[in-house]
Amino acid sequence: MTFQYKNVYVADTSTVVGPYEADGPLGNYFDDAYDDLYFGTDSWELAEVRLVKDSIKILLRKLKLTKDKVDLVVGGDLLNQITATSYGSLGVGQSFLGVYDACATSVEEIIIASNLIEQKRIGNALCVTSSHNMSSEKQFRNPTEYGAPKPRTATFTATGGASVFLTSKKDKIRVESTTTGKLIDYAQADPNNMGAVMMGAAAYTINKHLKDLNRSPDYYDLIVTGDLGRYGKDMLVQFMKEEYKIDLSKNYNDCGVMLYDLDVQEECLAGGSGPVCSALVNYGVLMKKLRDKELKRVLVVATGAMFSPTFVFQGENILSIAHAVSLEAV
C-alpha cells in the first residue's frame, strides 16, 4: 500500500552514536557520541537502553517539550521483546506502540505515526529506534568473546539511538508519502550475507512506490536503502535494471555504506546494519540537508531481515521486508 499525506511534518530529530559511527565520514552530523560501548553501564543491553533514553532526552530538549506533551511514542529495536525501547521510553508520552520489523523498523514507525496524524487521531508522535553492535551480535550470531571470523559480505550492526518528532503543525520537512512492503523469500539463508537476503524486498518496494505514484527515479534527488551494504547495493542496481527496467545508478546510495569509511574502517566489513543504521543517516544527515534545502526530495527505503537463529539452524530461509518513506523540503 502507498499512502500520501498533506498534513504530516518533521519538527526535529536527534541522534546519538557509538565510537565507530563517530569516527565515520558522517560523524559530525550526530548530536552526541560515546567513546566506548558500555556508556557508563554494566552491560551492552543497558547501554542500548541508554541510547534510547538519551536520544529521546535530546529531542525533547530541542523541541522544548515535556514528556507528557507527546501524544504517542512508536518504537522498536532488535533486543528480545524490544527491551531497549520499552525501558528507554518508559514514562514518555500519553501512549506507546512497540513495533518490530528488524532493520526496517524506523520507517514502519513513521508509516504508523503518519497515518494517525493525517487522520487527526493524534497531533504528534515521537518515533525512536536503536541498535547496539555487541548486544545484537550476542543475540543473533555468536558470543562476542568467541571472536568468530566473518566473511567480507557480512555487515556490522550500527550502535546508536535515533528519534524523530512528527507533527500536524507545518514545518520545513513534509512526510509526502509512504509505501509498505511485503515479506519476500528470496531463497537466501546466509546470516553473513544480509545484502543478498534483503535486496529482493528493497527492489519490490522501490518498484511499487514508483509505480503507485507514477514516478521515475529521477523524481528524487536521492534514493537510499537501509543496510544492503556494498555488495547488496551493487546487486540491487543490477536487479532493478534487469527485472524492472529501472536505472538507479545516478541517484542511489545505501545508508550502511554511507555510515562508515569502508576502506579505512575494515572491521565494518560490507557496511552498517541494524534498525538505527538507516535512522542515523535519515535523521542525522538527510533530514538536515532537507531542512537546509540542500536536498528537495528523498526516498528512504529501510530494509529488514526477519532473521531467527533458530530457524536458520533448522535450515529455513531468511525472509525480508522493506518499507519506504518519501520526504520533501517545504
Image (cartoon, rainbow, N blue to C red):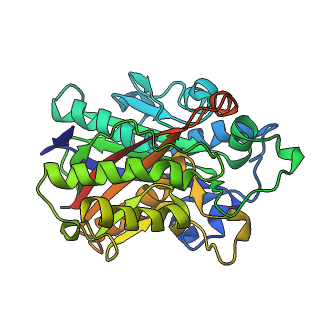
Residue positioned 62% across, 70% down in the render? 24
Which quadrant holds residue 107?
A: top left
Relative to 239, does residue 93 appear above or below in the rendering? above
Residue 294 lies in quadrant: bottom left
Q: Estimate the x, y position of residue 295 in percent, counting from the top left.
A: 28, 71
Q: Position of residue 292 (x, y in %)?
A: 30, 71
Q: Is residue 30 visible?
A: no
Q: In the image, what residue occupies the spot 33% across and 28% down?
A: 71
- The foreground one among 128 and 55 is 128
Residue found at x 16% / y 29%? 120
Q: Residue at x 20, y 44 (%)?
A: 169
Up the image or down, 301 lies above or below 320; here it is below
For the C terminus, which image quadrant?
bottom left
Q: Is residue 218 left or right of residue 104?
A: left
The picture places residue 200, in percent across and down from the top left corner, at 41, 50
Q: Give the percent coordinates (x, y) of residue 164.
A: 40, 46
For the residue pair 113 and 28, the one nearer the viewer reads as 113
| Quarter of the picture holding the N terminus | top left
Q: Is residue 231 visible?
A: yes
Q: Is residue 46 left or right of residue 31?
A: right
Q: Nearer the viewer, residue 61 or 330?
A: 330
- Is residue 159 placed above or below 126 in the rendered structure? below
Residue closest to the eye, 177 or 124: 177
* Number of disc labels: 0
